Amino acid sequence: MKLKALLAASLAALSLSAFAQAPIVIKFSHVVATDTPKGQAAERFKELAEKATKGRVKVEVYPNSQLYKDKEELEALQLGAVQMLAPSLAKFGPLGVKEFEVFDLPYIFPSKAALYAVTEGPIGKGLLKKLESKGITGLAYWDNGFKIMSANKPLVSPADFKGQKMRIQSSKVLEAQMRALGANPQVLAFSEVYQALQTGVVDGTENPPSNMYTQKMHEVQKHLTVSNHGYLGYAVIVNKKFWDGLPADIRSALEGAMRDATTYEKAIAERDNNIALDNIKKAGKTQIYVPNAKDVAEWKKVLLPVHKQMEDRIGKDLIAAIAKETAGK
Ligand code: LMR
């Protein structure tokens, strides 16, 4: 009897210590290649988080839609099947937080300084707060950059878009943008874009160069315009219940790791996109067009009315607040 009790006690102690040592696992799912600003920053976060928590946290990064595609990953986060994501800001509409689509408005950020004034200031923080009612905590904004347009025909003036089937993310603002250009927008998950371009399901698309290059889209697109007409960035988000349930010391170590990973991400975003555009040039399969001032004026004339058109969906006040925050930047 005594022996039995002793055995039971030592077994309990053993399993307790095993429990104490079992790391907390953060599954971080995303849809782009590892060799992109987001992909590299996810890896950097893993490294920093595991170090800062002395191995008490294990971060498993799943790139390239390995686990989930665009819409599914948001559902998986809410269900707790994964703990961390960094979806593009253009993908929060279907979740019911339409305000994030403000980031998709054409030409809304005249520069990176203007963008950061929004993402790092009260507007950005206020938007992340809106996610809480959806069971999501927003931790940071990550950057990618300004988008370029591609197709199998030159896209120089807005008239060139007429009737072109253009792949977009699931954002009503992007839909309105493509319609304003006379194109036919088609929502597709990121993982499906290359094949859709290759087989002609769609004619063209928009994305920053690094996403185009790492998915080899340039191999199936004959023309590309460095239009920089719109922005693509991310919100790093976690399942709120999971995050709130973490021991306080772990949570604050992870917050520190996220801060450092974010600084790193912002430092590499522009550089990586410039390199990607160069690589597309070198690959020699795509003709690259840089719009002149006259082209830009034409694009703006057609695209800026989208701001007004989307006021009811996004909120007039939010659009005005961004205009105020970014003025002169
Ligand atoms: C896209 O779907 O085009 C992008 O949002 C992918 C990404 O996450 O950068």
Image (spheres, rainbow, N blue to C red):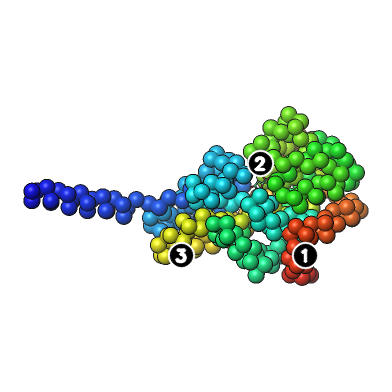
* Residue 7, horizontal then vertical, whole percent: 14, 48
Among the two numbered marks 2 and 1 on one chain, the one whose residue lies closer to the N terminus: 2
Q: In the displayed structure, would residue 165 be above or below residue 305? A: above
In which quadrant will I find the C terminus?
bottom right
Among the two numbered marks 3 and 2 on one chain, the one whose residue lies closer to the N terminus: 2
Of all residues, the one furthest to the left in this rendering is 2
**Secondary-structure class at tag 3:** helix
The kind of residue tagged 1 is: Lys
Q: Does residue 233 appear in this view?
A: no
The number of numbered badges drawn on the structure is 3
Q: Does residue 18 appear in this view?
A: yes
Query: Circle 2 is placed at which residue position?
Result: 190
Among the two numbered marks 3 and 1 on one chain, the one whose residue lies closer to the N terminus: 3
The kind of residue tagged 2 is: Phe
Residue at (73, 29) in percent of width and height: 199
Tag in front: 3 or 1: 1
Q: Nearer the viewer, residue 204 or 93?
A: 93
Q: Nearer the viewer, residue 148 or 273?
A: 148
Q: CA distance from mark 2 to mark 1?
A: 30 Å
Q: CA distance from mark 3 to mark 2?
A: 33 Å
Query: Circle 1 is placed at which residue position?
Result: 316
Q: Image check: 318 left or right of 44?
A: right
